[in-house]
Image: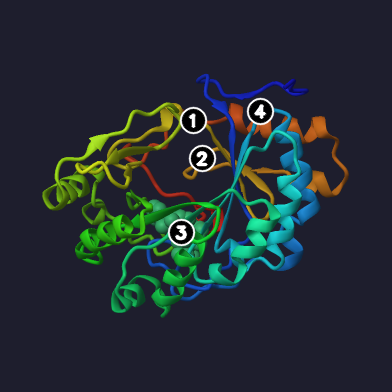
């Protein structure tokens, strides 16, 4: 395949092949590690990137070597007509993986349309199986809806993964039941460390349960985990097999073991800004120029400027670190 635009390579020789597209900042739950309890309004529709603009931008990036697109948010299934966007993106040449990250609450209703439109992968967030803990974390009811969403996904042709976030003092006791559930369902579960991206700015290091601590807990219950060799250095998860050779479990440890040196991700916010890092302080507006009819080369230049300005690492552990202005749901996780 030939690429009309040069690859998106930053100053540290990291080649960008993966794009996270946030399609909304709205959400139907209020996870305390992400959103505030009371939201001061979501982006109005007229400020969201429209589907044609998303497709135009992804088409340009596809010609610069981006081959994986993940739709996220907020809760991406809150964006009306999402399967139509999936269908439009699935027809872009060069995009070989089209994934969705969702809280699963609305998944069972939309799974068929998403599959029919060309979605290939889905990651479903699940931090507990218990309704009281779900309510404590999300400030809403509905773990049964998430479980229905997981069931629907597992009965579909999609490649499914579960994502869990553990906060000390909140859901540490849920780790073993979650792992057991994932093993029973035959689905890979990945634990991601709590990062300072909560809207409440209540993050503190003691609340973070490191991947290493989680792994020790899991090994005590299920035996020594066996590391799966990684073929892709930009893959942030360290994946393991269980001792009995079954199932799969992964640990994504951005706080205790940052993986910035192999980061290959570029982000597009729901209001049409490129970001080169979750923790970046700068954004590059692409919505305005796209609406005004920017050429492919102009759109490429905005993405390339953004990538070239990427820092070597997120700096969470640096003295003087402060979290970005926008919280996780506003950036796109
Ligand atoms: N609403 C969808 C969901 O929850 O899956 C997609 C967006 S959400 C921001 C994407 C992922 O980000 C979720 O798996 C969530 O657990 C994770 N996340 C949110 N806030 C986080 C934080 N402060 N640190 C680490 N991960 C976080
Ligand atoms: Fe919503 Fe996802 Fe943030 Fe939870 S993590 S509040 S589901 S956007």
Asked whether, in this view, residue 261 is left or right of residue 99, the answer is left
Residue 197 visible, this angle = no
**Is there a contact, CB below 8 Å, between mark 4 and mark 2?**
no
Image position of 170 with respect to 244: above or below: below
Q: Position of residue 242 (x, y in %)?
A: 24, 44
Residue at the disc numbered 2: 277
Q: Which residue is mark 4?
A: 65
Tell which circle, 2 or 1, labels the residue nearer the N-terminal end.
2
- Image point 68% across, 55% down: which residue? 271
Give the Cα distance between marks 4 and 2: 18 Å
Question: Could you say whether the residue bearing mark 3 is in a helix, strand or loop?
Answer: strand
Displayed quadrant of residue 276: top right
The residue carrying pointer 3 sits among few (fewer than 14), some (14 to 19) or many (20 or more) residues within 10 Å by Cα, namely many
Q: Are marks 2 and 3 in contact (CB under 8 Å)?
A: no
Residue 45 appears in the rendering: yes
Q: Which mark is residue 311?
A: 1
11 or 190, nearer to the observer:
190
Where's residue 53, x and y in %? 78, 49
Give yes or no for contact between labels 2 and 1 (Cβ–Cβ under 8 Å): yes
Give the residue at mark 3. Answer: 124
Query: Cβ–Cβ below 8 Å for labels 4 and 3?
Result: no
* Mark sitting earlier along the chain (3/1): 3
Is label 1 or label 4 in front?
4
- Confirm if mark 3 falls within 8 A of ligand 1: yes
Answer with mark 1 or mark 4, whichever residue precedes in sequence: 4
Q: Are marks 1 and 4 in contact (CB under 8 Å)?
A: no
Residue 297, placed above or below residue 281: above
Q: Residues within 10 Å of mark 1 (few under 14, many from 20)?
A: some
Lower sequence index among marks 4 and 3: 4
Residue at image point 59% right, 64% down: 111
Tell me: residue 202, above or below residue 9. Answer: below
Q: Identify the secondary structure beneath mark 2.
A: loop
């Amino acid at each position: 395949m030939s690429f009309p635009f040069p690859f998106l390579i930053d100053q540290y020789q990291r080649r960008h092949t993966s794009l996270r597209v946030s399609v909304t900042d709205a959400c139907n739950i209020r996870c305390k590690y992400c959103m505030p309890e009371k939201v001061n309004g979501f982006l109005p529709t007229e400020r969201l990137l429209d589907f044609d603009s998303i497709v135009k931008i992804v088409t340009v990036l596809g010609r610069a070597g981006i081959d994986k697109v993940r739709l996220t948010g907020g809760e991406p299934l809150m964006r009306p007509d999402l399967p139509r966007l999936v269908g439009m993106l699935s027809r872009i040449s060069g995009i070989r993986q089209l994934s969705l990250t969702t809280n699963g609450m609305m998944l069972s209703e939309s799974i068929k349309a998403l599959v029919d439109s060309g979605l290939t992968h889905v990651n479903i967030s699940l931090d507990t199986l218990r309704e009281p803990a779900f309510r404590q974390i999300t400030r809403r009811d509905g773990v049964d809806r998430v479980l229905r969403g997981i069931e629907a996904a597992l009965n579909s042709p999609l490649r499914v993964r579960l994502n869990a976030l553990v906060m000390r003092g909140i859901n540490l006791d849920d780790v073993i039941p979650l792992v057991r559930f994932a093993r029973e369902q035959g689905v890979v579960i990945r634990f991601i460390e709590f990062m300072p991206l909560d809207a409440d700015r209540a993050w503190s290091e003691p609340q973070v349960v490191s991947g290493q601590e989680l792994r020790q807990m899991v090994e005590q219950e299920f035996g020594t985990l066996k590391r799966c060799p990684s073929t892709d250095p930009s893959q942030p998860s360290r994946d393991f097999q269980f001792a009995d050779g079954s199932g799969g479990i992964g640990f994504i440890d951005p706080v205790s073991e940052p993986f910035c040196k192999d980061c290959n991700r570029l982000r597009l916010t729901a209001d049409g800004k490129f970001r080169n890092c979750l923790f970046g302080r700068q954004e590059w507006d692409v919505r305005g120029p796209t609406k005004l009819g920017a050429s492919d080369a102009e759109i490429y230049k905005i993405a390339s400027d953004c990538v070239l300005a990427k820092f070597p690492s997120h700096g969470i552990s640096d003295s003087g670190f402060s979290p970005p202005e926008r919280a996780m749901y506003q950036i796109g996780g």
